Image (cartoon, grey):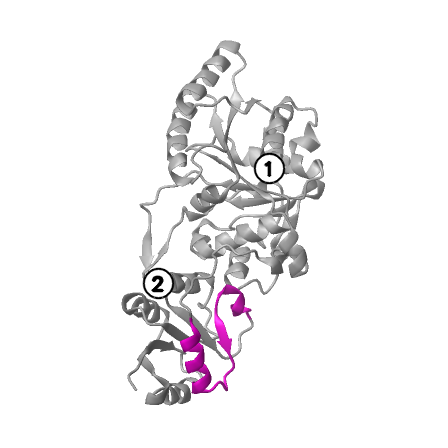
Amino acid sequence: MTSRIEVLVCAAGASWELALVRALQDPALGVHVARRCVDHGELLGTALRDSPHAVLVDASLPWVDRDFVTTLRRAGVAVIAIGSAARPLERVGVSCFPNEVSADVIAAALYSLDGGEPPLEAAETVVAGVADDEATLAIPGRLVVVWGGAGAPGRTSVAIHLAVEAARSGISTALIDGDVWSASIAQTMELAESPSLAQAARLAGDGWPSPLGECMQAGPDGLDVLVGLARAELWPEVREEAWRAVLAAAVLVYELVVIDVAAPIEQDEELVYDRVPFRRNLVTTVALERADDVALIVAADPIGLRRAVVAHRTLGEIRSTGDRDVRVVLNRAPRPGRRLQDCSHAVSESMGRVPAAFLPDEPALDRVRWEGRTLQQIVPRSRWLKELRPLLGEVSR
């Protein structure tokens, strides 16, 4: 019988490997073991080059995760894991079998493969701690990304206080620090730097052996906070599919998810490692692509306005809906009416919209950074907060 199914094997010397490979060589099974790979790099590179039907891996290998599986599934290659693992690999699209599995069973599984690709943003019902039927009926929350151009227009300050305002109004809210260049929410709110975004990404990559809630910290007024990376060099730990899964999980658990992201969104900083791209800016670009609303923070001065025009133009290229759901927020708006009018006119002329909020200069924000408290705690009647509240009404609909 001519071999019909080609597979690659990578098991790092697991107890089942030799016996199963020998058994699969039976011509009657119609399976051809094309190569036994020694490591992750060889397996991935060979699979993407040769496009076998499937790869057989040992379930205990740590790099068998959501991004690895999705990369292969997009190339039409299925993943079958053999052995025991502490992680629920089935949740990331892996077919799992015990050590004692026979060659006949594996062959049957290989022939049953339909080559389809599982949905990349399936609801992560396990993280909600509710029954599957309840999660299915749940309405996903809204994802709001607070972003702005280069410089320091005030992204983090707006993200923190927008999230706190939502929590104070009774909305179940999560605040996520997605700035992989210079995370600052933990320090600003005097929270521990761990658990953090990196831990949530690891859990998502492994199929959520623990729920997202274990990574969240309690903030003021009932707000849950996922702090950012403790060190900027940890950015490669947040891979694309894991990050997408974190977002999908968050909107299933919370009514409103507010994300503070870094300014850079350039795509030319790709580094190639084993043919899988690590992109430092993917946290920002994926969040912007996935967001229901984007709050574009603009420093209300000539330099800030120029940077915002460039940022807005690029943003429209990232989002499938263009700039339809982008809310422009002028921060540190000047007091003189003429200058404020000039800023508003510049936004309307270059971006085709009226600013959603004019946030004045607020000296008390300096106390926020030094004392680790929010404006709601320090100056609850702040005019800055008063101008911010209508924005919450727009993005939480």
Q: Amino acid at mark 2?
A: Ala
Q: Which residue is mark 1?
A: 160
Q: Is 225 included in the stretch rendered in magenta?
A: no
Quick one: quadrant of the N terminus?
bottom left
User: How far across and down, in percent of the image, does residue 391 sit?
Assistant: 59, 29
Q: Residue 101: give its label.
A: none
What range of the chain is rendered magenta?
A: 87-113
**Percent x, y for residue 223?**
67, 43
The residue under label 2 is 75
Residue 36 is at least partly visible in this image: no
Corner quadrant of residue 215: bottom right
165 over 21 or under it: above or below:
above
Residue visible at 31% across and 45% down in the picture: 268
Q: Please name whichever residue, 310 or 179, is drawn nearer the observer in this view of the structure.
A: 310
Circle nearer the N terminus (2, 1): 2
At x 70%, y 33%, the residue is: 377
Q: Nearer the viewer, residue 342 or 288?
A: 288
